């Protein structure tokens, strides 16, 4: 009976401990992190999306991401670099917090196509606007794993305007640096 009570006490403490730890989303704090992907099959591609933000109010961060990607196959090389300012609003005070986000982005892309013996080069711009909701789980007081579901409209200008609407699921991490005391 005593061992059973110890097991319940341990389980109770284990379940309540995360409720007392919460991340650093107070005014003056900073966040650093991002997401990325790599694809090894044809075409090979790698994308990174580092970001940095500052909490201008409690639970409200403003910042920017720097999306970069590279892709190549037997006929095409693709490089893209951009800037994506964002705003995030966090909800809750536990180890699992939810957030709403809005983002406006710009990317410039360079393509090189090999057609027979000729190399054709092309560059174009893409503008996008996205909004979404996500969750961050703080594995420590300052490190969080994130999942974000967002919907966005992308406008590309190559030879005319192309508009794409996309639903994205992104998983990444953030480091939350506390405000200096």
Image: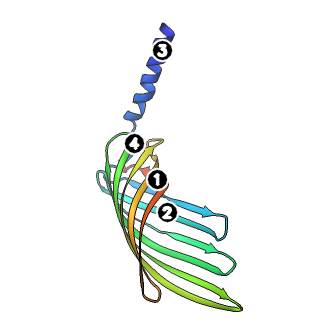
How far separated are the C-alphas under marks 2 and 4? Answer: 22 Å
**Which residue ends up furthest to the top in the rendered image?**
1
Q: Nearer the viewer, mark 3 or mark 1?
A: 3
The residue shown at (47%, 41%) is 140
Return the residue at label 2.
50
- Between tags 3 and 2, which lies in front? 3
Label 4 environment density (alpha carbons within 10 Å; few <14, some 14–19, many ≥20): many
- The percent position of residue 128, horizontal first and vertical second, equals 39, 73
Identified at 47% across, 74% down, the residue is 82
Crowding at mark 1 (Cα within 10 Å: few <14, some 14-19, many 20+) = many
Mark 4 lies on residue? 96
The residue indicated by pointer 3 is 6
Task: Give the answer, above or below, for where 42 lies relative to 52.
Answer: below
Sequence-first disc among 2 and 4: 2
Task: Describe residue 109's horizontal placement relative to residue 133 as left or right.
Answer: right
Circle 1 residue: 174
Does the CB distance between marks 1 and 2 fall below 8 Å? Answer: no
Would you place residue 75 above or below residue 94 in this image?
below
């Amino acid at each position: 009976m005593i061992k059973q009570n110890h097991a319940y006490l341990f389980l109770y403490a284990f379940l309540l401990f995360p409720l007392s730890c919460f991340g650093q989303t107070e005014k003056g704090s900073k966040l650093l992190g991002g997401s990325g992907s790599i694809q090894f099959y044809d075409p090979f591609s790698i994308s990174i999306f580092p970001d940095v933000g500052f909490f201008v109010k409690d639970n409200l961060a403003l910042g920017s991401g720097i999306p970069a990607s590279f892709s190549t196959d037997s006929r095409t090389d693709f490089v893209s670099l951009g800037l994506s300012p964002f705003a995030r609003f966090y909800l809750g005070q536990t180890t699992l917090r939810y957030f709403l986000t809005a983002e406006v982005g710009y990317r410039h892309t360079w393509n090189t196509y090999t057609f027979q013996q000729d190399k054709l080069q092309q560059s174009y711009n893409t503008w996008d606007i996205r909004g979404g909701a996500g969750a961050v789980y703080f594995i420590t007081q300052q490190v969080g794993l994130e999942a974000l579901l967002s919907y966005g409209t992308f406008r590309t200008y190559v030879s005319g305007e192309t508009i794409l609407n996309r639903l994205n699921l992104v998983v990444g991490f953030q480091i939350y640096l506390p405000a200096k005391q």
